Image (cartoon, grey):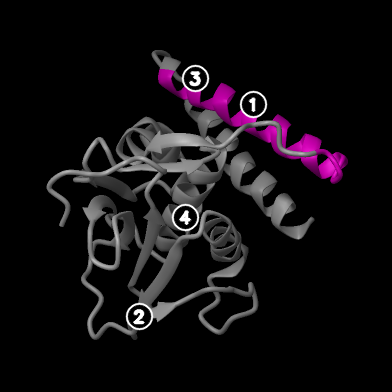
Amino acid sequence: MVLTAHDCLTLLAVMVRCADAMRHPGAEDDFLEFRRAVDRMDQVAQQWISPQRRETATPEPIELNRLVAESEGMLKRAVAPGISLRLQLAASPESRVRARRWDLERIVLNLVLNTARTMAAGGIVAVETASMQDGGPSVRLIVSDSGAVSPRSARVIPRFSASTEHGSGLGLAAVAQLVQRLNGVLQFESDSERRTRIQVDFPLAPGDAPRNAA
């Protein structure tokens, strides 16, 4: 229930910023993002009101590059003014994840918000994808701030509590739950300057075999 409420608050933040932008002419893109956020909010609210109601969407193979690119509008509107977004999508088209689309969107959205929350104006959130072979074929998602994390203090997070010491809160806890559901691996890296790098490795959808993997 608490994590569902957090999802509602996250989407409301997107909606508020879009609504502000729609006060100006030529804001059709903002209006479309507003409607998408409203639709997602409706789905979340339905699950909140009826916890016993099952998710109706069926997991399907989803190309991570395309999903991130199509989420760019939402991500730009979710972060604070003055924070920029940079996409580096290097995963092969064959690198797909079997998941519900909204689950993957929640992961990307919450990782971007977690990374951007301590940034000052002028900061850049980088979102990267890559096809991997080490340890078995997988597709990697990395979200980091514009400064390199050094020295790194990487931790694998099989289970994550919102009360953990680095204070990343409910967003990263929600991500950890979703990544675990998808049989992925989540790593969190930070340094004394509170710069972060968060990495998620997803297993490939059955039958996918990426070429030119890293």
Of mark 2 and mark 4, the one earlier in the sequence is 4
The residue where tag 2 is placed is 154
The residue indicated by pointer 4 is 113
Q: Which mark is residue 39?
A: 1
Q: Is residue 102 left or right of residue 50?
A: left
Of circles 2 and 3, the one toward us is 2
Q: Identify which amino acid the numbered label 3 is placed on.
A: Leu
Where residue 50 sits: x, y (%)?
87, 40
State whether residue 87 is above or below residue 113: above
Which residue is rendered at x = 45% and y = 19% of the image? Answer: 24
Query: Where 86 sits versus 73, above or below?
Result: below
Give, as a three-letter code, the residue at label 2. Ala
Secondary structure under tag 2 reads loop
Distance (Cα) linking label 2 and label 3: 38 Å
In front: 40, or 35? 40
The circle on residue 32 is: 3
Residue 133 occupies quadrant = bottom left
Distance of label 4 from label 3 (alpha carbons): 20 Å
132 and 152: which is toward the camera: 132
Tell which tag, 1 or 3, sits nearer the viewer.
1
The span shown in magenta is 29-53
| Earlier-in-chain disc, 4 versus 3 | 3
CA distance separating discs 4 and 1: 20 Å
Question: Quick one: quadrant of the N terminus?
Answer: bottom right
Cα distance between the residues tagged 1 and 3: 11 Å
Instruction: Mark 2 and mark 1 in contact? Answer it, CB < 8 Å.
Output: no
